[in-house]
Amino acid sequence: MRANFMKTLLAGAAMALCAGTYAGTAQAQVSGDAVKIGVLNDQSGPYADFGGKGSIVAAQMAIEDFGGKVLDKPIQLVAADHQNKPDIGVSVARQWYDAEGVDAITELTTSSVALAVQELAKERGKINIVVGAATSRLTNDACSPTGFHWAYDTYALSRGTGAAVVQSGGKSWYFLTADYAFGHQLEKDTSEFVKQAGGTVVGAVRHPLNTADFSSFLLQAQASGAQVVGLANAGTDTTNSIKQASEFGITQAGQKLAGLLFTLTDAHALGLNRAAGLTLTEGFYWDMNDETRKWSQRYFEKMGRMPNMIQAGMYSAVTHYLKAVKAAGTDEGKAVAAKMRELPVEDPFVGKNKGKVRVDGRMVHDMYLFEVKKPEESKKEWDYYKLVKEIPGDEAFMPLAQSACPAAKG
């Protein structure tokens, strides 16, 4: 009798010890004394207005709106400038992940940097959420179980702008392309949509990132005789291309410019006199509805300018990440990644139709085809776009059936 009692007592003690050990392990999964998020982007180069400090402010807004804590731990934000160099980006990311307890890295403007950091995050089992970089490879052949792609990608931009320009009569194309991963992929994706729509590609020229003088490249585009010059670049490279094309009389002579990655920030930098009539694809516009106007006004009060889709997308990405940490009960990368795919995306960025995160890490949401207003059509500052077409998310982004991501084949 006593022996049976002792066995029961020991079994109960063992169960209690296991339960205590498990609870301690679960608690230990909330690493350190804070949930730390790193914003890694271009803060001083050609993409400084594209995301830059505005993305940091958007991330701070998301943290504040979440209450500043998750799982009873404070949420901390760190930021760094990767200078559009993959080696610098990876060096910062390694320091953050390995030594400073950063749980998730986001923004990652510049596709070459984003691809490199995503590979490191995959090795470490850590979260990375790309918002500012465009290459569709991030959720295609270079996908990661803990990697996510948010606001837009080269496929969605090409699907919107490329197809629309061909349908409006721009059949023959010549590309002015930024000579790195982003530009190459945007040119490739757009070329495919142009050809599918019945157009042709007559040539391309590639320029270094952050080019000041586009004269030789624009003269080659002019000499091609193409109806459309597709600008497969972004940030100040795009605005400088457009300014100098006007100075060379390219648009006045009848060639059309297609800004394949063009944001509200670019329209503001150019002014409506130069930007009017440009067709573009974005995932967000501040003046879409009451919810976008309300959130954007809060952002304006902090930054003195309206947000573009990258900055609004940052708010969305950080908000969703924090919801996933809360739902997972831990900041451990793979557990959070599972919850990010499970939970619907609900915030001002995605709007009424919500968003969803696919197995390949692509956040699917509606995209919009816009045309830049003429000066006489604009009623006030930042009133720059008129909506041409809404593109449902399942049409805007690459179908999973076409993806080379291993998770899409499972």
Image: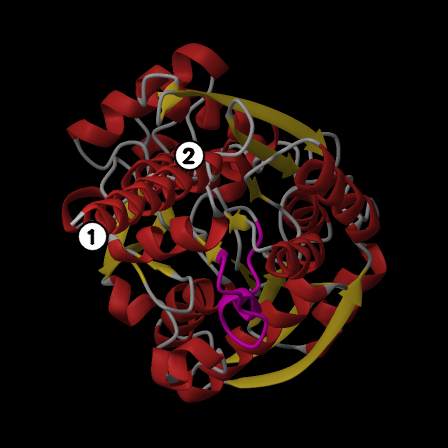
Residue 4 numbered mark, or none: 1
Q: Secondary structure at mark 1?
A: helix
Q: Nearer the viewer, residue 351 or 341?
A: 341
Q: Please give the range of residues in magenta.
A: 133-147
State the separation of the CA atoms marked 2 and 1.
34 Å
Q: Is residue 300 above or below residue 71?
A: above
Residue 373 visible: no
Residue lying at 43% horizontally and 51% vertically, measured from the top left? 150
Q: Nearer the viewer, residue 364 or 172?
A: 364
Mark 2, residue position:
27
Q: Earlier in the sequence, mark 2 or mark 1?
A: 1
**Of marks 2 and 1, the one in the foreground:** 1
Q: Nearer the viewer, residue 314 or 142?
A: 142
Which quadrant of the rendered structure holds the C terminus? bottom left
Q: Is residue 229 above or below residue 302?
A: below
Q: Amino acid at mark 2?
A: Gln
Image coordinates for residue 375, horizontal then vertical, percent? 40, 32
